Amino acid sequence: MLNREAYEEREKEFLAPYAQLSSKSLGRQHKESECIFRSSFQRDLDRIVHSTAFRRLEYKTQVFINHEGDYYRTRLTHSLEVSQISRGLARMLRLNEDLAQTIALAHDLGHTPFGHAGEAAMNSLMESDGGFEHNFQSYRVVTKLEERYPDFLGLNLSYEVLEGILKHSTEYDHPKNLEGFQKSGYPTLEAQIVNYADEIAYMNHDLDDGLQYGMLTFKSLEAVSLWHETFLEIEKRHPSAPEKVKRFRTISRLIHKLIDNLQEETRKNIEEKKIKTLDDVRQKGKQLVTLSPEMKKKTGELKKFLFDNMYCHWRVVRMAEKAKRTIKDLFEAYVSNPKILPEEFYDRIQEEGKTKRHIADYIAGMTDRFALQEHKKLFDPEERV
């Protein structure tokens, strides 16, 4: 049997000297005996997959509200795609695949229903009480809100996983409240590759969703150099393939290009900055994981195109307004009368105060469809409560 100790020895033999070893984890807040056959990060991954918050990601959407269509990506499918890309990058760079995959699967646990529109609405409503930011909410989920153990709240995850969740940073994610992680230096390379895997995943699945539902067209995408040059490659190889197949192959090729560029540029950065150990990553690790300047320019053009043509599409804007209105109505109803909350959340308010923070916890934990159903129950006189 390959037990935990044998697995940890394999890590030491195979992983790069600047990778985060399971055996060198800074540990957990609450002491637990080690698992016989799983490393610390494998154990964390299992805890996340079995959590309530992870299961709810199935009915939380990225850009579109859940009932708009079955094809659209959800937070769950997005997290799986980020996990897949992160694990592949970790393997190529000889980093800890288990740690990268675990951070990837946990990075969106704190998202509100209705995607970024929901988070924007919640942040505005919580402005006087510290605001709302989904990285910190993910951290609250895994350290406080999940209740699965008799001796502590949360999932008691390893330090490196918590750090990766809290410091998750992309164009749309700007972590501010770092609690006890300010002095640890730059995050592990495993955490840094998740940041870019997130961007690679959302850019490409938003392209796919937009094309599938007619908000984007092949013709309009000719203006985007990264898409157009990749599409021409596919067109040359498979001129008679159906349009749907060309779409799939172009997106697959795009992901491949971005991953290849990222790992190549990251290797160059590691060499130029003379990164030899994990301590070097902590001290000199700013922007170690990056795309090349040319690829950054091309992805910037793609992101702008998506913003102008998809995220500002009238259908998306209408859904965003509906989402913001729903969350605002729920929030204000609960603030005006906390007794209409579920008993466990009302009890927390009675014990701890912080009314708005507990209400934010409750709403952020909702799926799209549950939030819409709850709104009906509270505001439709004919709906049964």
Image (cartoon, grey):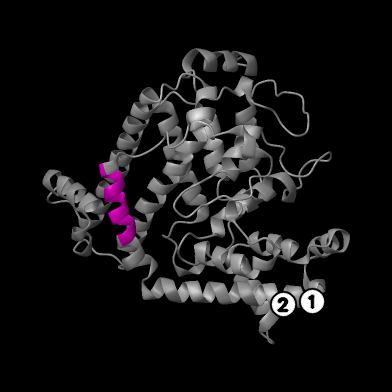
Give above or below for 195 relative to 113.
above
Residue 30 is marked as: none
- x, y (%) of residue 44? 64, 34
Task: Tell me which residue sits at (72%, 32%) in the image.
Answer: 28
| Location of residue 100 in the rendering, given as x and y in whole percent from the top left corner | 51, 34
Mark 2: which amino acid? Ala
276 shown above or below 84? above
Q: Position of residue 332 (x, y in %)?
A: 69, 76
Label 1: few (<14), some (14–19) or many (≥20) C-alpha neighbours in 10 Å: few
Asked whether residue 214 is in view, the answer is yes
Q: Secondary structure at mark 1?
A: loop
Front residue of 344/165: it is: 165
Q: Where does residue 222 sit, x and y in percent of width and height?
A: 18, 59
Q: Where 334 sits versus 34, above or below?
A: below
Whole-angstrom CA distance, mark 2 to mark 1, is: 6 Å
Residue drawn at x 47%, y 55% as measured from the top left: 172
Residue topped by disc 2: 333
The quadrant of the picture occupied by the C terminus is: bottom right
Is residue 303 in the magenta section? yes
Residue at the extreme bottom of the image, as rendered: 381
Furthest residue toward right: 351
In the picture, the quarter occupied by the N terminus is top right
Residue 175 part of the magenta-drawn span: no
Q: Tags 2 and 1 in contact by the CB under 8 Å rule?
A: yes
Q: Residue at x 21, y 64 (%)?
A: 220
Circle 2: is it few (<14), some (14-19), or many (20+) Cα within 10 Å? some
- Residue 74 or residue 345, whichever sits in front: 345
Q: Which residues are magenta?
A: 294-304
Q: Secondary structure at mark 2?
A: helix
Q: In the figure, is residue 229 to the left or right of 23?
A: left
Task: Name the residue tied to disc 1.
Answer: 337
